[in-house]
Image (tube, helix red, strand yellow):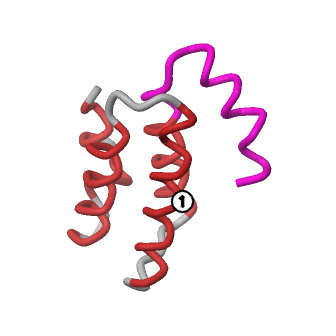
Amino acid sequence: MNNWKNNESFMQMEPDKQHMVELLVNSLHGKNLGEALPILSNWKDKLRSENITFTASEDKLLTDIFIEMLPPKQKSQYEFLRPFL
């Protein structure tokens, strides 16, 4: 599950970005999609308030981590909702 920590995009992130990713992962652990979406929304608000942005490769990593954490049925639900997020 923590193989994302070895991802090149993660390892090259600034420490504050790494901290935010770890915060998100810890917050989402064990959550279903219904519980995860409000957490994700609040996390994005926190990023905006702290003026933290991610590159395209970092965004892809975040999406991959999020999808990896979901049960199979909820992965397909997320893929349906993804364009609206």
| Of residues 85 and 62, the one drawn nearer to the viewer in this rendering | 85
Location of residue 77 in the rendering, given as x and y in whole percent from the top left corner: 70, 27
Tell me which residue sits at (75%, 40%) in the image.
Answer: 81
| Of residues 21 and 84, the one drawn nearer to the viewer in this rendering | 84
Tell me which residue sits at (55%, 33%) in the image.
Answer: 33
Q: Amino acid at mark 1?
A: Ser
Location of residue 18 in the rendering, given as x and y in whole percent from the top left corner: 26, 60
Residue 77, compared with residue 82, is above or below; it is above
Magenta stretch, residue numbers = 67-85
Residue 76, compared with residue 37, is above or below; it is above
Q: Which residue is mark 1?
A: 41
Tell me which residue sits at (29%, 26%) in the image.
Answer: 1
Left or right, 29 with reference to 82: left
Location of residue 55 in the rendering, given as x and y in whole percent from the top left corner: 51, 67
Q: Residues within 10 Å of mark 1 (few under 14, many from 20)?
A: few
Quarter of the C terminus within the rendering: bottom right
The kind of secondary structure element at disc 1 is: helix
Left or right, 49 with reference to 77: left
Residue 50, compared with residue 17, is above or below; it is below
The number of numbered discs placed on residues in the rendered structure image is 1
Q: Main secondary structure of the magenta part?
A: helix
Left or right, 12 with reference to 74: left
Location of residue 67 in the rendering, given as x and y in whole percent from the top left corner: 53, 32
Q: Quadrant of residue 23?
A: bottom left
Tell me which residue sits at (61%, 24%) in the image.
Answer: 75
**Membership of 1 in magenta stretch:** no
Left or right, 28 with reference to 32: left
